[in-house]
Every structure is written in C-alpha cells, then in structure tokens.
Amino acid sequence: VRMTGLVMLVSALKSPHRLGRTAGVFAALLIAGSFALTGHTASGSQRWLLGPLVVLHVLIVSFWFGALKPLILVTGQERAEDATRIVARFSRIAGWSVPGILIAGLILAARLLKDVEALLSVYGVILACKVAVFTGLLGLAALNRWFLGPALASGGSRACRRFRQA
C-alpha cells in the first residue's frame, strides 16, 4: 500500500494537470494510511482508535516537514512581502495542526505502553528520542513563529536569510 502510494505520488508530482494535485492528495492519504496497517497500531483490540490516530499523526508530521523546503525556497526567491504572507499562512495552519502531533502521540503512547517500565523497552527508547526531537523542533517553530516570521515583515532580505538559517 505504501509503495503504491509512493509511485502515485511521484507520478502526481510529474503531472502538469489539476488531476495530478488530486492524485497527490490521494497518494499522501494512502501513504499515511499504510502506517495503520502495520506495526503496533495494527494489532490489538484498540486498532479502531490507534489506526486513525497514527494516520493523523503521520499526516501532520508530513505536512510540517514537507513545508520546510518550500518555506526555505520562498524566503530565498520571493519578495519579502510575499514570503512574509506565505510564512504567516503556514504559521496559522501549523498553529492549530501541530498540537495534533502532541495529542495523537500522547494518546498512542498511553495506549501502547503497558506500564512505566515499558519506557525502558526498545519502543520506550524510540519514543523518548521522538519526544526529544519533537521538543527541539517545537522550539525552532516557536522561534520562527514569534520572532523570525514577524521580522520578515520589516526586515527585508536580511530577515529572510535569518529565517532560512533557523
């Protein structure tokens, strides 16, 4: 399922037609949905809850990471006014969607970890690494949202460079 989605996504990216955009969205949903078909969320009695949560989690994380390169390009190639508008729009979307990463992750962890000792398992260590990375990225996101993004409005090309570097 994931490979089918990836092949569809590559094909959609090469398509100059509007249908390619629709196919790309469908492919992204297929890829995200494939995570609910394998691993710890696919087995057990709570599959009905864990499957949709992991799909939501993957979609939001994909949006967040997927937007980084375009934001870097926009701040390097577009006028400061346009870059400011685009970064502000991304920040609004991320502002209400990124908490979904945390909420879905917390529910998934609470349902998958049997007890506190499970934090010492391989899954627990991976989870701790994910939490550490997420915390660091949230710090960068806050820096961009409250300081670097607004500075784009008044700082011109210098602010764009600082935004890209962060």
Image: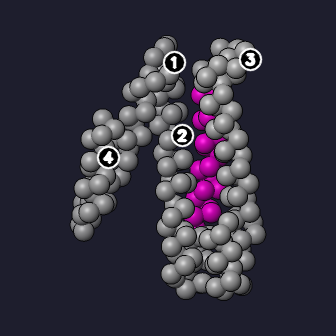
For marks 3 and 2, give the CA distance.
23 Å
**Camera-nearest residue between 6 and 103:** 6
Res 116 label: 3
Magenta stretch, main secondary structure class: helix
Please, what secondary structure does the residue beneath circle 3 have? helix
The residue where tag 1 is placed is: 46
**Can residue 106 be seen at all in this image of the molecule?**
no
Left/right placement of residue 41 relative to residue 100 reads left
Res 6 label: 4
The three-letter code of the residue at mark 2 reads His
Vertical comparison of 76 with 49: above or below: below
Query: In x, y percent, where is residue 161?
Result: 64, 77
Q: Which one is earlier in the sequence, the residue at label 4 or at label 2?
A: 4
For marks 1 and 3, give the CA distance.
20 Å
**Camera-nearest residue between 134 and 149:** 134
Crowding at label 2, few (<14), some or many (≥20) Cα neighbours within 10 Å? many
The three-letter code of the residue at mark 4 reads Leu
Please, what secondary structure does the residue beneath circle 4 have? helix
Q: Which one is earlier in the sequence, the residue at label 3 or at label 2?
A: 2
Q: Which one is earlier in the sequence, the residue at label 1 or at label 3?
A: 1
Which of the two discs, 3 and 2, sits closer to the camera? 3
Which of the two discs, 1 and 3, sits closer to the camera? 3
Is residue 98 part of the magenta span, yes or no?
Answer: yes
Vertical comparison of 103 with 60: above or below: above
Residue at 45% x, 17% y: name it.
Answer: 43
